[in-house]
Amino acid sequence: MPPSASPLHPTLYRYALPALLRAAKAADDPQSAPHADLAAPLAHLRDEAESAAAFAPVSVTDKAAPPPSGDPKDYQSIATYVWPNPESKDGLPWVEIDGKRNPECDNYDQEPLHRLSNAVTTLALSAFVFNNREHGRHAARLLHHWYLDPATGMNPNLNFGQHVPGQCHGRPWGIIESALFIPPMLESADLLEWTGDLPKAEADALRAFFARLLDWLQSHPYPLYIATFHNNHGVYFDQLVARIALYVGQPAVARAVLARVPHKIREQIEPDGAQPRELRRANALIYTSMNLRGFLQLADMSARLGIDLYAYRSPEGSSIRAGIDFLRDLATGEREVSFKESAVWQPHAAALLAMAGYRFRDPALLKTAAAIDPELPASRVHLTHSATP
């Protein structure tokens, strides 16, 4: 159990601290009657943490060639759904096939960032829940190598995200990669400070890096453009900016971002809960689940600032809860609509419904989530969300 643990800890915005404290207590005796429901997720977290402990440091400098700037410390990725043009001899410019991921993506920085985020979040949870100092220190080393090391640390910009060969060196849509993977790492950094595994000097340096990245996000044309989007890109952009702002001590910036979320709920979620902009995509139900997760995490951050987005309902009836109920009805077969779906979507929906079940204090959502994903009982969502904010 972490020393001086308090349910009033101010810097957790994605996890429910009472849930983490319960998990840490259960870790001492996971088979005891009050905590038996956490035995499976605790065992699964231990296994994942042991694997993450073997994860070697990665860096943006690992890619085979530098971006157009010539600086390997600049983040670069390739657009997820673009492929060589079959109608040109050199394959240029590459063209989009929605829903079909190009494995060439793995040769750039997006996939290492994804794996880094998974490792850091797993190790930080292990440090907190199991009081495992070596796991916490390794998470801190991983953060240092990617962000702070003078030789390997990333530059604070996303100029070359989702470039398209033969068309552009970077696009506004590249920001979503960082929006998916950075906020959980910031939550983890806060946990690592609390457990003592991230020294103050490192924490200060990490905040300085993200303050510079926040400056870029508030001034470069790419983020200024994507901020206006009423789809998952706009939702996750808001999540990225708000979480960084809270991490670096700029709550006024976070409040300004969160103040526009009700408008995005109204624009993106129909009164019946459908999300037309996501449902028209290939892998429509994965995108629907993903966007709802973004809205729910924005509501989590807002709750810490005294803003209740869980209960928000537009004059027309649009709300996060309506979106959750729409997805639930699809999962249970109560609603039938034809979608373009080429990937397994149920685990994504189950995790989202479980999070919502805890946030809305609705056991029926948890029951539905468990019914559609047999692996859900071992999910870490039960360790991080089982007590509401």
Image: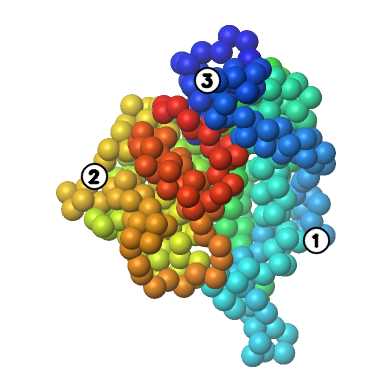
Q: Local crowd at mark 1 within 10 Å, few (<14), some, or many (≥20)?
A: few
Secondary-structure class at tag 2: loop
Left or right of 121 in this view: 318: left
Q: Which residue is mark 3?
A: 34
Q: In the rendered image of this protein, does residue 307 appear above or below residue 266? A: above
State the CA–CA distance, disc 3 to disc 1. Answer: 54 Å
Quadrant in which the N terminus is drawn: top right
Residue at (78%, 40%) from the top-left corner? 51
Q: Quadrant of residue 297?
A: top left
- Taking the image as shown, residue 109 lies to the left or right of residue 235, namely right
Residue beneath disc 2: 313
Q: Categorize mark 3 by other alpha carbons within 10 Å: few (<14), some (14-19), many (20+).
A: few
Q: Quadrant of residue 95?
A: bottom right
- Does 109 sit above or below residue 188? below
Q: Residue at x 49, y 53 (%)?
A: 372
Secondary element at image label 1? loop
Q: In the drawing, what numbered circle is on residue 65?
A: 1
From mark 2 to mark 3, how far is it between C-alphas?
36 Å
Q: Amino acid at mark 3?
A: Pro
Q: Earlier in the sequence, mark 2 or mark 3?
A: 3
Above or below for 108 versus 356: below
Q: Position of residue 25 (x, y in %)?
A: 59, 17
Q: Secondary structure at mark 3?
A: helix
Q: Is residue 348 visible?
A: no
- Which label lies toward us, 1 or 2? 2
Which of labels 3 and 1 is toward the front?
3
Q: Amino acid at mark 1?
A: Ala
Q: Are marks 3 and 1 in contact (CB under 8 Å)?
A: no
